[in-house]
Image: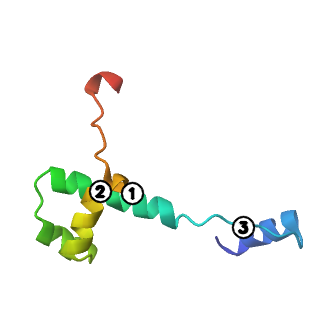
């Protein structure tokens, strides 16, 4: 976060326990949604494997899971 902001956090929280949330789960969900979108758009699983470093087995397991539910496209009327 940088020295300046780190000092500001130290001044504000002084000795208190500060729990910083881990965004790992959000990143995994976003990756799963991206894989689903790419797959639905016709990208081959082999290409998804190369792009993500995941195995074919993992990609297919992810596609079957609820985590990778397709995201509904935003209609032009909503924008």
Name the residue: 35% across, 52% down: 66
Which of these two is toward me, 75 or 32?
A: 32
Instruction: Please rate how many residues cluster around mark 3, counting C-alpha atoms within 10 Å: few if below 14, some from 14 to 19, many from 20.
Output: few
Q: Which residue is nearer to you in this view: 78 or 31? A: 31
Q: In this view, does 42 lie above or below 44?
A: above
Mark 2 or 3, nearer chain start? 3
Looking at the image, residue 15 lies above or below residue 67: below
Picture quarter with the N terminus:
bottom right
Left or right, residue 27 beside residue 47: right
Q: In the picture provided, is 66 more to the left or to the right than 26?
A: left
Per the image, the residue denoted by label 2 is 34
Residue 73 appears at what percent x and percent y? 27, 37
Q: Where is residue 77 in the image (x, y as percent from the top left)?
A: 30, 21
69 or 72: nearer the eye?
69
Which of the 4 quarters of the picture holds residue 71?
Answer: top left
> How many numbered tags mark residues here?
3
Q: Are marks 1 and 2 in contact (CB under 8 Å)?
A: yes
Q: Which residue is drawn at 33% across and 59% down?
A: 32
Q: Where is residue 67 in the image (x, y as percent from the top left)?
A: 37, 55
Q: What element carries label 3?
A: helix
Secondary element at image label 2: helix
Q: Distance between the residues labelled 1 and 3?
A: 28 Å
Q: Is mark 1 on a helix, strand or loop?
A: helix
| Disc 1 crowd, CA 10 A, few/some/many (<14, 14-19, 20+) | some
The residue wearing badge 3 is 5
Q: Name the residue under label 1.
A: 30
């Amino acid at each position: 976060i940088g020295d300046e902001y780190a000092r500001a956090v130290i001044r504000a929280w002084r000795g208190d326990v500060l729990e910083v949330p881990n965004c790992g789960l959000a990143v995994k969900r976003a990756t799963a949604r991206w894989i689903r979108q790419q797959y639905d758009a016709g990208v081959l699983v082999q290409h998804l494997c190369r792009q993500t470093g995941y195995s074919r087995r993992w990609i297919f397991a992810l596609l079957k899971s609820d985590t990778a539910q397709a995201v509904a496209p935003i209609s032009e009327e909503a924008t």
